[in-house]
């Protein structure tokens, strides 16, 4: 949980007391979960290994007078003989296969350069990009000349981490229709530690007509749902709620009727803003982002008759924190 001083809202005295109580309860619940699973440590804490032989010291550990001590704050993890400390609020560290959301900052020869909330920019090569015709072929000089018709500066893109090259450059790939340009939505930046790596990062919220992408790099996309069939996806994968994007035609070249078809209805815009505000509140409180928690927060705002703009007010922050206490308490009791 975040400290109350980090919240960018003005609280009344009663709200301060309620929020402080909720934060203290959440800290107690978190410590109970940690003690029953993996031990939480701070710098210089001794990590108990029961005098085992052949223990390997991993990241965040050091040996002092025969004991293994923590050099970072976090949670002790073990993989066979390897002992290391997993930091709770670490910066984003790309791993191959990560689903990320980024913003184009440069169109260079045969590549786009993206800002992805990492210590260095990432590169998406033209050869690693799925073209509109869907045909797998060599990229020609014409393709290179038409790069700006695919992505240009400030475009928001969803892609997959391909890995680091020998020169240290982080490369991305977008070889499927589910990746590509994201339009008609909001891009949110959150702390990457609040987005855990999961099997599914694309989510279609059918009740709201919204596509949600929880990028591993801490960039979250909330936008209008777009249906595009991807021939590369198998029948099993088609049943999964995944965002599938395609580039949109230039609105200036569309007829009035076609423009109406691409117009985002006011209700959908409200849903985008409501879901985005729910994410902002959860992020400010330091609550890990999951689809279930986000939807529960949205439903709570509607049940309590909070308007979209009221969701970023002090009272809703307090009620979300109190609701999180109830949720975690009930989940512990079920165990």
Image: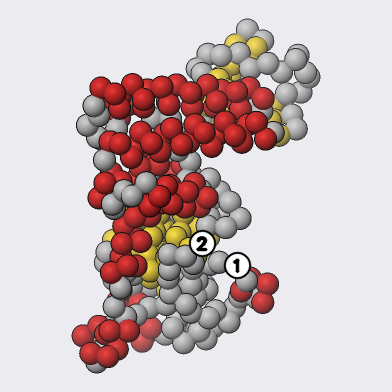
SS for callout 2: strand
- Packing grade of label 1 (10 A; few <14, some 14-19, many >=20) is few
Cα distance in 3D space between marks 1 and 2? 9 Å
**Residue pictured at 43% horizontal, 68% vertical:** 209
Mark 2 crowdedness (10 Å alpha carbons): few <14, some 14-19, many ≥20: many
Residue drawn at x 76%, y 14% is 51
Tell me residue 197's x, y (percent). Answer: 55, 48
State which quadrant residue 5 falls in: top left
Is residue 217 something one can see in this rendering?
no
CB atoms of marks 1 and 2 within 8 Å: yes
Residue 240, which numbered label?
1
Query: Would you say 60 lies left or right of 295 here?
Result: right
Q: Which residue is mark 2?
A: 202
Q: Is residue 244 above or below residue 139?
A: above
Q: Is residue 279 above or below residue 17?
A: below
Q: Position of residue 38 (x, y in %)?
A: 64, 27
Residue at image location 77% in from the left, 18% down from the top: 52
Image quarter (top left, top right, bottom left or bottom right) of the N terminus: top left
Q: Is residue 57 left or right of residue 272?
A: right
Residue found at the far top of this picture = 65
The scheme the figure's colours follow is secondary structure
Q: Is residue 41 left or right of residue 125?
A: right
In the rendering, at what x and y percent does residue 19 appear? 36, 27
Q: Secondary structure at mark 1?
A: loop
Residue at the spot 35% in from the left edge and 77% down from the top edge: 150
Q: Nearer the viewer, residue 111 or 60?
A: 60
């Amino acid at each position: 949980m975040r400290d109350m001083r980090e919240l960018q809202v003005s609280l009344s005295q009663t709200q301060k007391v309620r929020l402080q109580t909720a934060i203290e309860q959440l800290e107690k619940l978190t410590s109970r979960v940690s003690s029953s699973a993996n031990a939480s440590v701070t710098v210089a804490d001794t990590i108990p290994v029961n005098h085992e032989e052949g223990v390997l010291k991993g990241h965040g550990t050091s040996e002092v007078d025969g004991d293994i001590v923590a050099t970072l704050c976090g949670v002790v993890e073990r993989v066979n003989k390897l002992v290391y400390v997993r930091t709770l609020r670490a910066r984003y560290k790309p791993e191959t296969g990560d689903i990320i959301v980024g913003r184009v900052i440069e169109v260079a020869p045969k590549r786009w350069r993206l800002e992805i909330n990492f210590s260095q920019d990432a590169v998406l090569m033209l050869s690693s990009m799925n073209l509109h015709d869907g045909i797998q072929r060599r990229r020609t000089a014409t393709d290179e000349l038409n790069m700006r018709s695919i992505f240009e500066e400030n475009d928001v893109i969803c892609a997959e981490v391909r890995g680091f090259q020998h020169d240290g450059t982080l490369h991305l790939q977008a070889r499927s229709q589910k990746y590509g340009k994201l339009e008609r939505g909001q891009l949110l930046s959150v702390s990457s530690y609040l987005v855990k790596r999961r099997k599914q990062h694309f989510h279609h919220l059918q009740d709201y007509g919204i596509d949600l992408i929880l990028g591993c790099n801490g960039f979250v996309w909330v936008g209008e749902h777009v249906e595009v069939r991807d021939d590369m996806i198998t029948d099993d994968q088609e049943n999964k709620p995944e965002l599938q994007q395609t580039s949109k035609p230039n609105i200036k070249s569309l007829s009035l009727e076609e423009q109406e078809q691409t117009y985002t209805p006011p209700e959908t815009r409200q849903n985008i803003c409501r879901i985005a505000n729910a994410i902002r509140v959860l992020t400010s409180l330091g609550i890990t982002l999951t689809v279930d928690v986000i939807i529960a927060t949205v439903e709570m705002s509607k049940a309590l008759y909070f308007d979209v703009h009221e969701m970023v007010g002090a009272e809703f922050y307090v009620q979300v924190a109190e609701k999180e206490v109830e949720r975690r308490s009930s989940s512990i009791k079920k165990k």
